[in-house]
Image (spheres, helix red, strand yellow):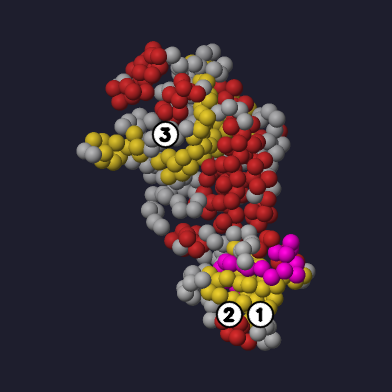
Amino acid sequence: MQRILSAQLPTHVGATVRLAGWVHRRRLLKSVAFLIVRDAAGLAQVVVAAPAVRAQVEALPEETVVEVVGTVVVNPTAPAGVEVVEPEVRPLGPPAVPPPFDLYRPVLTASLPTQLDHAPTALRHPTRSAALRISAAAVSGFRATLDARRFVEVHTPKVVGSSTESGANVFALDWFGRPAYLAQSPQFYKQLMVGVFERVYEVGPVFRAEPHDTVRHLAQYTSLDVELGFVTDHRDVMAVLRDTVAGMLAAVADRAGAALDTLGVTVPPVPVEIPAVHFTDALTIAGAPADEPDLAPAHERALGEWARAEHGSDFLFVTGYPMAKRPFYTHPDPARPAYSNGFDLLFRGMELVTGGQRLHRHADYLAALAARGEPVEPYAGYVDAFRHGMPPHGGFAIGLERFVARLTGAANVREVTAFPRDLHRLTP
């Protein structure tokens, strides 16, 4: 008999079926026992009346893996309106050691550090697994949106010989006796692949040795990177980003509806044209000094409130960041060279995406490195490619975990990360 999932039970009323999953909860009443079995699709209620089977169930702690064979009957008060009766129950392993929290409760009451210490079991809780389902759907939408626009998925090295951003905040390692680093981003490689495919994207880990112990930073996170050639300027990149975010959210609504319901989340609309303000105007809106070189989290929150009040939008582009705060490969604004053809996308008052137009002429790279006092040699393999013809191009990177955290309202990005790596955590 082929196993079915709990969500399929309503289509098998009157039939004998085989379920398998984890003991989610046991309710032992005087005349009957209820066994709640959890699988990847949800919960199934199993009614146990036979004394021998009841004795089995009483000996099975929560989280024990079991197989159940029984008959499906209608019961409007049971999950999905059906339940399994006259069951045979067979353990598929030894009795489980219960985790240090109750997974059957609607909310995990354990502290976040305790949940992270016991992530393999904490992630079984519907509220934790729901966030990961949303994450998977978002990545699916990211890929589908870009595939439909003839982007090509690429895979680039995560061990590199030079850092992407001037040697700061990188994890150094020994590569057969030579210095190497974990990649901060696929930035250099995705630019070079524009010279091959014109339009590329990558989904992969990036590593930042930033000593931040905040609710929004991780030392390793998943970056959704995009680069496209033959752009006029950064506004072409922003248009692709807008469609990409819309595609991600549409996929979440389509593929992760049950997860959204579990968390009580509604997918926000993406405006046809996301409102945009220049960095100098953003400082004024946020009440920041005019000489402020960057936006602080408090400024981002103020801008998010302004975008919601003035435009009814959860999204806001901030363009024209100062060149002094952007990497050397960023293209300056031709009309205002102190500012960049770069942007951030804020989502509900937090930076979600950084992007912009890149330099594409070899001479401009040499000049940009010289202006910052940077030697060319560490970047030679990257810079040399621009001698051989590269089109005007640009791109962006979305932090997946931060995207999901903002969408779900999680207070800490670690709540939506399966096995976070940060300043303090290398396990499990």
* Label 1, label 3: how far apart the Cα atoms are: 54 Å
Question: Which residue in the protein does label 1 denote?
Answer: 48
Q: Amino acid at mark 3?
A: Thr
* Label 3, label 2: how far apart the Cα atoms are: 51 Å
Q: Amino acid at mark 2?
A: Val
Residue drawn at x 65%, y 42% is 251
Looking at the picture, tell me which residue is in the foreground, 385 or 300.
Answer: 385
Query: Is residue 333 located in the magenta-colored stretch of the structure?
Result: no
Quadrant in which the N terminus appears: bottom right
Question: Which residue in the protein does label 2 denote?
Answer: 57
Q: Position of residue 117 (x, y in %)?
A: 44, 61
Q: Badge 2: how crowded within 10 Å, few (<14), some, or many (20+)?
A: many
Q: Amino acid at mark 1?
A: Val
Residue drawn at x 46%, y 22% is 196
SS of the residue at dot 2? helix
Q: Badge 3: how crowded within 10 Å, few (<14), some, or many (20+)?
A: some
Q: Residue furthest left?
A: 177
Instruction: Tell me if residue 413 comes above or below residue 368 in the rendering.
Output: below
Q: Is residue 81 visible?
A: yes
Q: Are marks 1 and 2 in contact (CB under 8 Å)?
A: yes
Question: Which residue in the protein does label 3 denote?
Answer: 156
The span picked out in magenta is 9-26
Residue drawn at x 65%, y 49% is 256
Q: Is residue 323 visible?
A: no
Quadrant in which residue 352 is drawn: top right
Instruction: Tell me if residue 22 comes above or below residue 159 in the rendering.
Output: below
Quadrant in which the C terminus appears: bottom left
